[in-house]
Image (cartoon, grey):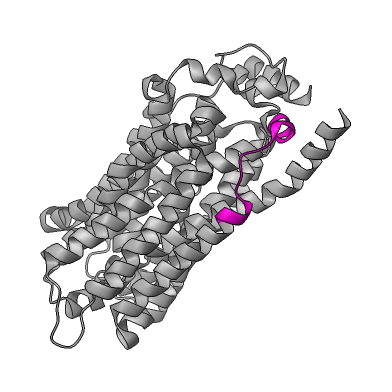
Amino acid sequence: MENGSVVGARGAQHRWKVLGVGFAANASFSAAFSGIPTTAVFLRSGYHLGNDGLGLVLGMLGLGIALSELPWGLLTDRWGDRRVLLLGLLSTAAALAGLALFVSPGGTHVPGVTLLASGLLLVGLLGGSVNGSSGRAVMAWFREGERGLAMSIRQTAVPAGGGLGALVLPVLASRFGFASAYAVLALACATTALFAWRWLHEPAHGDEAVAAKGEKGAKAADGAHSPRRHGAAASAPAAAISPLRDPRIWRVALGAGALCMPQIAVITFGTVFLHDFSRAGVLAISATMAAVQTGAAIARVWSGAWTDRRGNRRAYMRGCSLLTAVLFAALALATGLAGMHHAALAALFAVLIVLGGVSASAWHGVAFTELATLAGTSRAGTALAMGNTCVFLTLFLTPLAIPALLSVGAWPLVWTVASACALIALPVLPRAAPARAIRTARACDAA
């Protein structure tokens, strides 16, 4: 008993290192898939691309991630998060190094669009390993009542890494060429792999008891299982049903995919809207987009801690869906009524972009915690991969759809469709558990 207590205490301290590795892994890859699109102007000139070619190569990253998430998730549940995360980070670093060496323009050498698109597709295919494996590691080391905060902190790595990539990559690409940009990204992934090799391990038996405490109580809130009796066996019932056959998990995953459309619309075309429609200057645009990313990071951490205390993850996701739909409907209305007075309403557009972008991003950590909790730790890799597949399919499709919407109905139609997608997520997302089941779950966690 004394030895088990020592192991559990050691695990309680070590879990923060595991969370740090998960954060670093997501930030490293986010700097690539969110940072490379910020070099779009230099991609177009450096690789001699037209707008169609630019859209194709930028979409390849999202497509690669969407195609590979589920296979990587299944492999994570079979091999373990440590092996898959190490393999994914090192292979992604190798792919980025290959881009730096062989697919970077220089002098008279200009790689073709097919070669560049294939290289970015490969980066997406390999980097898709990071999301599910790092999330499964965090779920294994944190218990119910703490996981929402832990997963939300991990999810803040996406805007943090994307923001860092947006600051660094355009400067590198414009001053030193794309070889330097790809090389820095490769170095970041390789460095994170070193941290994972040092600190990321499967929990020992005593650590599993600490991390698993309360997981079965969370399942009782869903009405699927009776209260917990043995902490170490808490995740065992989850193995009875594959996440691929669980409609509750599919509802969360599909709802997340729909709710991502307005978020991605802001990230990919928010700067274009502010520049072309509201006539905002460079400083105002930068400040607005920085506010979106900063607000999203703060909202994710806050929402994780808040839903941990209140046990209301599903209600929170549904609330974000409704609020996002209202905010983007207001943006569509304001855009439609603006007429020729675009500049006079620039401040209003910026505020709505920030509020809508934050609302459409705040739920990520909460949703992925719910996915992993529904599946159980042993199947969390698959469940997280299902959610990420839907999210990154949206990342692939949204930048392709917005130019078509602009050609048909201009910006009011874009924001109307964004509002409709957020509203569609509302009936798709599962409803909150009954109050009696939530009380049972909390009693199990307290036991």
Q: Does the rendering let one see residue 440? A: yes
Q: Residue furthest top?
A: 226
Is the C terminus in the top left, top right, bottom left or bottom right quadrant? top right
Is the N terminus in the top left, top right, bottom left or bottom right quadrant? top right
Q: Does the rendering let one see residue 298? A: no
Q: Taking 169 as reference, is 72 above or below it?
A: above
The picture quadrant where one finds residue 249 is top left
Q: Nearer the viewer, residue 73 or 315?
A: 73
Q: Tag count in the figure?
A: 0
Q: Nearer the viewer, residue 108 or 251?
A: 108
Magenta range: 196-210
Query: Which residue is found at the position 53% from the left and 55% from the top?
Result: 156
The picture quadrant where one finds residue 286 is bottom left
Using residue 416 as the reference point, say whether residue 214 is left or right of it.
right
Q: Taking 425 as reference, is 23 above or below it?
A: below
Query: Which residue is found at the position 56% from the left and 30% from the top?
Result: 377
Query: Which residue is found at the position 39% from the left and 21% from the top?
Result: 247
Using residue 220 as the reference point, say whether residue 320 is left or right of it.
left
Residue 418, image x and y in percent? Answer: 30, 47
Residue 357, image x and y in percent? Answer: 42, 55
